[in-house]
Image (tube, helix red, strand yellow):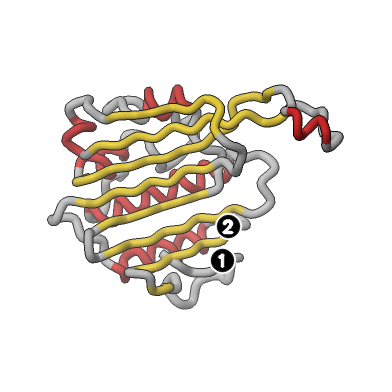
Amino acid sequence: NLYSGSVPQVAVKEAVQNAIDGIRANAGLVSGLIRVSYSSKDNRLVVEDNGAGMPPSVATGELLDIGGTDKPTGSTGGFGLAKAVLFSHARDLRIVTRARAGTKPPGVLQRLRGQPEPQPRIAETTVTGSGQDWLGGGLRWETDDDAKAGPTGTRVEIAFDDEVQPEEWSVRNYLGNLLDKHALPIQFDFTVDGRPVEPAAGRRPVQHRATI
C-alpha cells in the first residue's frame, strides 16, 4: 500500500526514496550522498541529494501536476502519486533541483587553460509555495537554463502543518531498514535539531554516516 503508515512516515519515505532514485539515475556517480535533517522548532524536513536532479520539464510539469508522475515502469516511491502526502500537508514548500541540460561551448578561460571541450550545461529550477498552492495550481517556479557550474541534485524543504510531526524513532527505523534493503554506495547524513542521529542499531554497516 503506497500510503501505509502515518503521514509523517510516508512523507519521509517518499522524500528519501526520491533522493535514492535520483542517485541511481546519475550515471558515473561514484558515491551518493543524502542529507536528511529535521527541525522540531518549525517542524521542517530537508532532504538533499547529489543525484541526477529533475529537468525543468519535470520540475514545472509532472511535479506540479496533482496526478502526474515521471516515474518509469518498475520505479518505486519518489515523486509519483505519493507526492500528495508530501505536498498537501506543507505549510511551506521549497524545491531546488539541478540537472544536466546538454553542453555549451567552452568559455574564454577554459580555452586559455587548454580545455577546449564543450562544458556541461546545468538547468536549475526552484519551486516555492505551500500545500494549498499545490492543490490550487498556484505553486511558483523559476528556471535558469544556464546555471552556474556545480553538482547536480535536488533539495526538498518542507515545513509541515502542525498535525504532522515526524518521530525520530520512526525515521531511524526507516533509514535502518533502507540500509538493509539497498546495498548502495550512499552516505546518509541524518540530523535532528542539529544533532547527529544513527539509523536503528543492528543494521547492515553499509557505507554511511548517520544523520537524519
Residue sitting farthest toward the left? 163
Pinpoint residue 118: horizontal percent, then vertical percent: 75, 26
Q: Which mark is residue 186?
A: 2
In the displayed structure, would residue 107 be above or below residue 203?
Answer: above
- State if disc 2 and disc 1 touch (CB < 8 Å): yes
Q: Mark 1 points at which residue?
A: 208
- Mark 1 Cα-neighbour bin, 10 Å: few <14, some 14–19, many ≥20: some
1 or 2: tag closer to the N-terminus: 2
- Badge 2 amino acid: Ile
Q: Splitting the image into 4 quarters, where does residue 205 fall?
A: bottom right
Q: Which residue is drawn at 52% across and 25% down?
A: 145
Residue that appears at 45% across and 67% down: 211
With respect to residue 203, does 110 lie above or below?
Answer: above
Taking the view exactly as shown, the residue that stands out farthest to the bottom is 201
In front here: 159 or 184?
A: 159
Figure quadrant of the N terminus: top left
- Give 103 or 22, whichever is nearer the viewer: 103
Residue 8 at x, y percent in the picture? 25, 55
Q: Where is residue 107 in the image (x, y as percent from the top left)?
A: 72, 28
